[in-house]
Image (cartoon, rainbow, N blue to C red):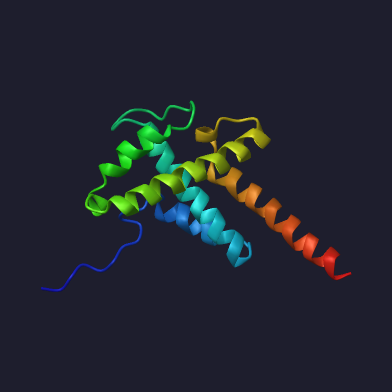
Amino acid sequence: MTPEPYDPAAESPLTLAELAQLEATLLPALERHHLRLLAHGLRTLQAISRPTGAALELGPLPDRAAIGAWVRQQPPIADDAEFQAALVEQLVATGGHLEHIAGELGRAPLALELDDLSAWTTRQADRRLGQGETNRG
């Protein structure tokens, strides 16, 4: 029996179109990677905040307890407490980044869109690259 081919979008919180949108940016590799992490984190935190079948609440980010409860319910990592703990920490940290970005835009973190993340990441790349040129002069 031949195994099914790996489909990265099958388990992703992002659609194929969203993944393509992120990859189509003209960002350097480091910033594009950061953008993908932020986008995955945003969609995951939105999923945690939304009970199955409910509309997305654009309120505050889920707290550590809610994130932990969601993580423990994920079958692929059900038997890996160490990975679960690391994932909780990553999602909490991503939430902090999203709060920062949302604060700059005057929006709720869960109301951010991929375009917001792309624009913010582009500004960060421009700053980083601009500083590099200034330091060389």
Residue 74 image position (x, y, % from top left) = 26, 46
Residue 122 image position (x, y, % from top left) = 67, 54
Classify residue 108 as left or right of residue 9: right
Answer whether residue 13 is visible to the viewer in this image.
no
Q: Looking at the image, which is closer to me, 4 or 97? A: 97
Residue 23 image position (x, y, % from top left) = 52, 61
Farthest residue, direction bottom = 2
Residue 10 image position (x, y, % from top left) = 30, 55
Farthest residue, direction right = 137
Q: Quadrant of the N terminus?
A: bottom left
| On screen, residue 66 above or below 38 | above
Q: Looking at the image, which is closer to me, 70 or 130? A: 70
Q: Residue at x 69, y 58 (%)?
A: 125
Q: Residue at x 82, y 66 (%)?
A: 133
Q: Quadrant of the C terminus?
A: bottom right
Q: Residue at x 51, y 40 (%)?
A: 95
Farthest residue, direction left = 1
